[in-house]
Amino acid sequence: MFTAIAKGLGITFKHMLPGHSTTVQYPTVKLKMSARFRGLHRLVPTQDREKCVACYLCPTVCPAKCITVEAAENDKGEKYPRIYKIDLLRCIFCGYCVEACPVEALEMTDAYELANYRREDFEFTKERLLK
Amino acid sequence: MTEMLSMSNNWPLFVGIMLLKLVVVFAVTMLIVAYATWCERKVIGHMQTRLGPMRTGWHGLLQPIADGLKLFFKEDIIPAQASKVPFLLAPMMILVPALITIAVIPFGKDVTVGGFTVPLQITDLNIGVLYILAFAGLGVYGIVLAGWSSNSKYALLGGVRATAQMISYELAAGITIIAVFMLSETLSLREIVALQAGPLWGTITFLPDWYVYKQPLAFGLFIITGLAEINRTPFDMPEAESELVSGFCTEYSSMKYALFFMAEYANMIVISAIAATLFLGGWGAPLNIGILNMVPGVVWLLAKVFAIMFFFIWLRATLPRVRYDQLMQLGWKVLIPLALANLAVTGLVVVLQL
């Protein structure tokens, strides 16, 4: 019993010595997210517009039903999303939309500090998602 | 007591010096209490590979002040079903015995000020050790009263646990201390410290004659029973967050809760100071070398107190809480027989004048 206690005391003492802390001082020091981290969505732009072709695969696959898409046709006769909205309050960050997208127009960034004050602020429109 | 009497002929001086000593000792104790909380959080944090408080001031140094202010401004709730008077009385009854025990701890050589000798000790009772034991026993009432008057199941369980635990361990603690004053043949802490100043075994000149060398078992037992007396891990059964919410202080809030908190740390200081005085030579230097004896006694006493407190914190970071039956088993079947055996052997040695 005493050897076990002594061993435990040794371990805790060793941990107390400098350089053993694993704490990250979060707001001042931030960890780099993994490349596969699923944070805030982003619509990938091309030269003049978004890549999205409004195929409706993402709202279809979305288990939380948080994506709203409305398709329209532009002057060149291309199909584009007139409205593209993600309601982050419903989103579960599963990443199925990204997987479903046939043209790789949607990706997920490493932004995770998404807290806000008003409900409206969680409605990410096309303009905000393109940033 | 002779110096004190000569000084008390000049009563304004006596009262003045007494008040000064009281204020200084109280202030220092309170400061240690405040920063013991910070040290505990820091040390435990690092031992659990965390950092502890970091945001309030440099490395969280202002944390105790922030905590105190926060508790001071919190709403003070008295449960409707609680017994009001005991509920109010309990926090005081636990803090006061903890603080007044410090009165008999000597913290340095006599100082001569303007022809008067001022003993660096608030009062030298000829029954000092008994006084300590008495107030350690009185401390239980605060906990039991808090548990009972809260009129809550968890608080009551905490209080009941505290009674059984304290009574069991006080016995062992008392018996271990008896072994010390069988050697010293005095109950005055001042004389006990003085007796520990001589060379070890009367022969080894560079080491002081501390009782820890003569009574190592008693020292170990006293530290263990002391831990149980002040309800610290691994014996913090009356609080036992994971079982009893917060035990006897579940229903307390605001400054009343802060008093319990302060009492816990004050008790820790007191037990450390008693252990240092009885076993580690009080304010005496750890080596009988001229230069170390030049250092004021307060420094050595505080160093010893802090060392023991660090050990308590270290144990808290290391050991899990014991189960209640294990606690009782340890108290009655291990510590008390060991203490009695130690007492018998010491008695034999003293009688045979070995």
Image (cartoon, coloured by chain):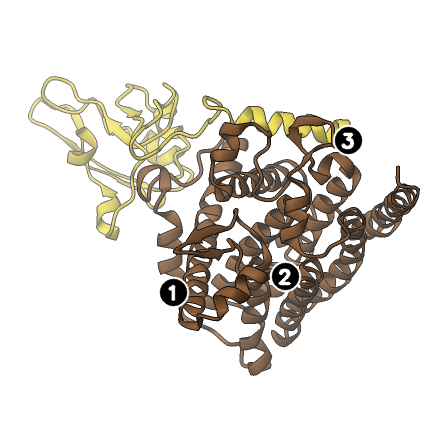
Q: Do circles 2 and 1 both sit on a common chain?
A: yes
Q: Amino acid at mark 3?
A: Phe
**A124 or B246: which is nearer to us?**
B246
Give me the disc on residue B64.
Answer: none
Binning the other alpha carbons within 10 Å of mark 3 as few (below 14), some (14 to 19) or many (20 upward) gives: few
Indicate left or right for A69 with B327 as reference.
left
Callout 3 secondary element: helix
Would you say residue B254 is visible in this rendering? no
Binning the other alpha carbons within 10 Å of mark 2 as few (below 14), some (14 to 19) or many (20 upward) gives: many
What subunit carries mark 3? A
Q: Amino acid at mark 1?
A: Phe
Q: What residue is drawn where x is 36% and y is 23%? A: A33
**B7 or A43: which is nearer to us?**
B7
In the rendered picture, chain A carries what hue? yellow
Q: Amino acid at mark 2?
A: Gly
Task: Please name the residue that numbered disc 2 is placed on.
Answer: B247
Quick one: which chain is brown? B
Q: What residue is drawn where x is 9% and y is 21%? A: A48
Binning the other alpha carbons within 10 Å of mark 1 as few (below 14), some (14 to 19) or many (20 upward) gives: some
Task: Please name the residue that numbered disc 1 is placed on.
Answer: B72
Q: CA distance from mark 3 to mark 2?
A: 29 Å
What subunit carries mark 2? B
Q: Is residue B13 above or below residue B239?
A: below
Q: Is residue A117 above or below residue B307?
A: below
